[in-house]
Amino acid sequence: MRRSIIGTLATSAMVALGSIGARALEVGEKAPHFEVPSTKGSIQLSDYLGKRHVVLAFYFADFTPT
Amino acid sequence: MQAFQKDLLRFEKLNAQVLGVSTDSLATHEEFSSKHGLTFPLIADEGGELQKLYAPGRVTFIIDQTGTVRFVQKGVPVNEALLEELSKF
């Protein structure tokens, strides 16, 4: 019985976290590592560390009015 | 993204690399880049994994060269505000 309650609570917590959706990174946090395909080849955040600042701009889609 | 291209030299002068990210494929990005003369990289985040790591929706991050988030701008990017932030570094 106790185990099932704990299980239910754990599941509820996970559902609650999931409903918040994607996390929103905030000022002061470390930017998460990434390695992704781009029009200039594979890019990693670490390519720029110690060299340049990065302006990472998420947008909806190509060929849409801006 | 065309607005970033227009101000790209100003970003470069402030030692910043502009990266555009959407869920479009590399093929679509290539076509879009060549049509609009974009010379900075466009990231193909087809599964939305990068977006999940950062934040939902239309949003622009300035990450300094130590890897720390220094500025978050929601909505349509405003270059003047981004350039002003970068000029403080």
Image: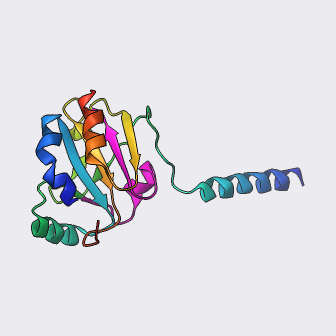
Q: Which residue is drawn at 51% across and 49% down?
A: A23
Q: Which residue is drawn at 24% across and 30% down?
A: B87
Q: Which residue is drawn at 43% across and 59% down?
A: B57
Front position in the image: B49 or A28: A28
Q: Which residue is drawn at 14% across and 65% down?
A: B33
Q: Is residue A18 left or right of residue A40?
A: right
Front position in the image: A32 or A54: A54
In this orientation, does residue B36 appear? Answer: yes
Quadrant (top left/top right/bottom left/bottom right) for the N terminus of chain A: bottom right
Q: Residue A44 in the image: x percent, y percent?
A: 26, 46
Q: Is residue A14 left or right of residue B40?
A: right
Q: Residue A55 in the image: x percent, y percent?
A: 27, 44
Magenta-drawn segment:
B43-64
Q: Is residue A57 magenta?
A: no
Compared to residue B12, the image places residue A57 above or below, namely below
Quadrant (top left/top right/bottom left/bottom right) for the C terminus of chain A: bottom left
Q: Residue A30 in the image: x percent, y percent?
A: 41, 35
Residue A36 is drawn in which quadrant?
bottom left
Q: Residue A65 in the image: x percent, y percent?
A: 28, 70
Q: In this view, does B2 lie to the left or right of A19?
A: left
Residue A54 is drawn in which quadrant?
top left
